[in-house]
Image (spheres, helix red, strand yellow):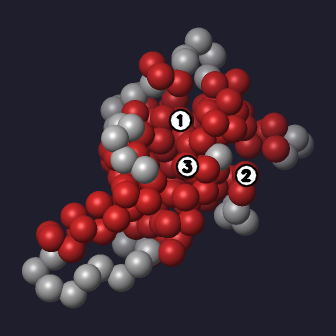
C-alpha cells in the first residue's frame, strides 16, 4: 500500500476520533499511535507519520472554514446530518486540495477510495459531487 494512501487512512481514523468531541487533536493523534503500538507484535513504537500528522493538524485547525466550504456545496445537507465518516473524508480532502500541493484529481480519487472502504455504498458519489464542485470553484475552466 503506498505510503500516502496509508497516511490518509490514518488521518481519517484520527479525525473520526477527534470528531467525537472527547479529545483534542493532539490527544487523538497520541491515542492513535498508542492503539497501533498495542496491536503490533513488535514492541518498538510505531514511527511517526509526518504526512498524516500534517493532514490531521491542518484539517482540525481549519475545520470551521472547511465546514463552510462543504456546506456551501452540499445541497440540503447540513454538516451535522452527514455521517461522521463522510464529513471527515470531505474535511480531509478539502484541506488537502486547498492547503497542500497535492493535485486535486489525486485527492478526489483518494477520498473516493476512503469512502468506498469506510462508508456506505452511496457515499462515494456524494463525496465526489461535493469535492468536484469545490475543485471547480478553485480552478474554473
Which is in the foreground here, disc 2 or disc 3?
3
28 lies left or right of 132: left
- Comparing 46 with 72, the one in front is 46
Q: CA distance from mark 1 to mark 2?
A: 16 Å
In the picture shown, does residue 128 fall above or below 103?
Answer: above
Q: Residue at x 51, y 75 (%)?
A: 50
Mark in the foreground, 1 or 2: 2
Q: Position of residue 117 (x, y in %)?
A: 34, 48
State whether residue 61 is above or below residue 122: below
Q: Quadrant of residue 6?
A: bottom left
Within 10 Å of disc 2 (Cα), the crowding (few <14, some 14-19, many 20+) is: some
* Residue 32 rendering spot, x and y as whole percentages: 31, 62
Tell me if 77 is positioned left or right of 122 in this view. Answer: right
Residue at which label 2 appears:
98
Which residue is at a point 14% across and 85% down the rendered structure image?
42
Looking at the figure, which quarter contains the N terminus? bottom left
Give the residue number, with chain letter if any, for mark 3. Answer: 60
* Of the image marks 1 and 3, the number of the one nearer the N terminus: 3
Amino acid at each position: 500500500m503506498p505510503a500516502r494512501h496509508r497516511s490518509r487512512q490514518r488521518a481519517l481514523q484520527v479525525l473520526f476520533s477527534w470528531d467525537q468531541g472527547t479529545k483534542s487533536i493532539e490527544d487523538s493523534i497520541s491515542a492513535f499511535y498508542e492503539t497501533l503500538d498495542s496491536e503490533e507484535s513488535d514492541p518498538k513504537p510505531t514511527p511517526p507519520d509526518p504526512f498524516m500528522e500534517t493532514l490531521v493538524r491542518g484539517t482540525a485547525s481549519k475545520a470551521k472554514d472547511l465546514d463552510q466550504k462543504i456546506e456551501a456545496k452540499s445541497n440540503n445537507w447540513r454538516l451535522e446530518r452527514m455521517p461522521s465518516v463522510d464529513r471527515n473524508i470531505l474535511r480531509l480532502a478539502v484541506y488537502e486540495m486547498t492547503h497542500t500541493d497535492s493535485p486535486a484529481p489525486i485527492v478526489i480519487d483518494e477520498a473516493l477510495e476512503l469512502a468506498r472502504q469506510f462508508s456506505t455504498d452511496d457515499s462515494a458519489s456524494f463525496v465526489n459531487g461535493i469535492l468536484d464542485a469545490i475543485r471547480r470553484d478553485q480552478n474554473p475552466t
